[in-house]
Amino acid sequence: MAKSLQTPAPELQKPGVKAPVQETLLTPRFYTTDFDAVAQLDISADEAQLRAIVDELRADYNRHHFVRDSEFQQSWDMIDGETRRAFIDFLERSCTSEFSGFLLFKELSRKLKQRNPLLAEAFNFMARDEARHAGFLNKAMADFNLSLDLGYLTKNRTYTFFPPEWIIYAVYLSEKIGYWRYIIMFRHLEKHPELKFYPLFGYFESWCQDENRHGDFFKALLRSQPQLWNNWKARLWVRFFLLSVFATHTLTVLERASFYHSIGINAYQYNIQVIEKTNETAARAFPVILNTDHPEFFRRLEECSDINLKLTTINISNSPKIVKFFQKLPLILSIIGHLLRLYFIKPIDAEVSRQAVC
Ligand SMILES: [Fe+2]
Ligand SMILES: [Fe+2]
């Protein structure tokens, strides 16, 4: 079991504005898609369910939730050293992924307005929520004398193209894993209030209900498209997305173990709990889920994380590029080997049990 690395001090783009982290496979991505294809989706198979969720989104239960109360009105200079660096890193990562959701949903709502008003309305409400989440996190960063220039990010980040079906799989999972990440942290700090070193954590309970509703919307959208779950190709894709999301989660959480440690959470246990809960939840939407009880499941994921930490150490070393390349190659191949072995672990059929848990 390797130790997590120290978080580097934040780099500045200009005074008070944090330079965005270098984009890697593990940093939150910005997405774009085929908007015409989304507009043409026939949602009639699950329209009643989708309408019910849009009504919930319209009710806007959290409209008064994201208000900074007096608890924020103080200096946070006492949070220092590794705790401060790791927390800023957590805030930046969370803010970027919330903002990425905002951009995608806003664009979808804009492009679908005339052609698919129900979906457009849903995306508009979800963009509203993600804008609040990102804004709230960015204000938290400002408490540490830093903020993200979201306008700069919008213009300068690379946008990854995903066809609509990948967007549906990936966003469904990211909403549900987001829900579990926030609620598990909230419940832990509710039991150990002495570890809650900053008021933001107290907001996560209602906040994560937004993510849960977003996930439910994507679940209904997915189930309205039988080709996304009733054939062998869909089963293979679902396994791919589950594994990608769980591997990324393991690598990023274990790389930032010092942040979790600062709030009294064991990063290994947290990772396992979040993945198990998300996998269980995914049985309500996906035709298959992964067998997280398999003895090799978490062992291999954690080995990938150990190798990833070695890769990070090589990346930040001063060796010439060519030396780094040959040092990294066997490690990358080893991660691919672990992921392939994980991919081929027999999955669990969710269609059989899905009706019972819906
Ligand atoms: Fe969000
Ligand atoms: Fe969300």
Image (cartoon, rainbow, N blue to C red):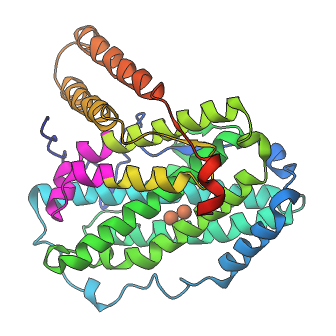
Residue occupying the point 29% across, 47% down = 253
Residue occupying the point 53% across, 82% down = 62
Image coordinates of residue 28 in percent, x first then y, are 45, 46
* 231 relative position to 104: left or right: right
Please name whichever residue, 276 or 81, is drawn nearer the observer in this view of the structure: 276
Q: Quadrant of residue 52?
A: bottom right
* For residue 43, above or below residue 29: below
Q: Quadrant of residue 188?
A: bottom left
Magenta-drawn stretch contains 253: yes
Image coordinates of residue 114 in percent, x first then y, are 89, 62
Q: Which residues are magenta?
A: 251-272
Q: Main secondary structure of the magenta part?
A: helix
Magenta-drawn stretch contains 312: no
Residue occupying the point 26% across, 59% down = 88
The outermost residue toward the bottom is 70
Image coordinates of residue 158 in percent, x first then y, are 54, 38
